[in-house]
């Protein structure tokens, strides 16, 4: 997978598409575990600050590396 688009060089839609492609829902929570990683949040909600250009992908990702 490519690196996350930089906020200053991408659109909100491009960032949303990146998150959707990077963290796709496979509708099998027992097998996947993404919701657990994001503390019960959908990836699009977890990365809202990145998608809306408030914080970088790396900054938001640090929130979930605990």
Image (cartoon, rainbow, N blue to C red):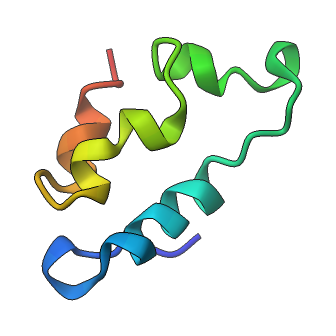
Question: For the C terminus, which image quadrant?
Answer: top left
Q: Nearer the viewer, residue 28 or 52?
A: 52
Is residue 24 shown left or right of residue 12?
right
Tell me which corner region of the image, top left, top right, bottom left or bottom right, holds residue 52.
bottom left
Tell me which corner region of the image, top left, top right, bottom left or bottom right, holds residue 22.
bottom right
Q: In this view, does 66 lie above or below 49?
A: above
What residue sits 31% from the left and 44% below the top? 48
Is residue 39 shown left or right of residue 32?
left
What residue sits 80% from the left and 18% below the top? 29
Tell me which corner region of the image, top left, top right, bottom left or bottom right, holds residue 62.
top left
What is the count of numbered marks? 0
Q: Which residue lies furthest to the bottom in this view?
A: 9
Q: In this view, does 46 lie above or below 52?
A: above
Q: In this view, does 57 lie above or below 15?
A: above
What residue sits 49% from the left and 22% below the top? 41
Is residue 54 shown left or right of residue 41?
left
Residue 17 percent across, percent down from the top left? 53, 68
Q: Which of 12 and 30 is in front in this view?
A: 12
Residue 50 percent across, percent down from the top left? 26, 53
Q: Is residue 33 above or below residue 14?
A: above
Is residue 24 shown left or right of residue 4?
right
Q: Which of 58 and 13 is in front in this view?
A: 13
Question: For the N terminus, which image quadrant?
Answer: bottom right
Q: Nearer the viewer, residue 51 or 4?
A: 51
What residue sits 69% from the left and 20% below the top? 33
Residue 2 percent across, percent down from the top left? 51, 75
Residue 12 percent across, percent down from the top left? 32, 71
């Amino acid at each position: 997978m490519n690196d996350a688009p930089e906020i200053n060089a991408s659109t909100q839609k491009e960032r949303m598409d990146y998150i959707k492609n990077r963290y796709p829902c496979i509708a099998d929570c027992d097998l996947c575990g993404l919701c657990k990683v994001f503390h019960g949040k959908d990836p699009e909600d977890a990365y809202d600050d990145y998608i809306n250009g408030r914080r970088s992908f790396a900054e938001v990702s640090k929130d979930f590396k605990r």
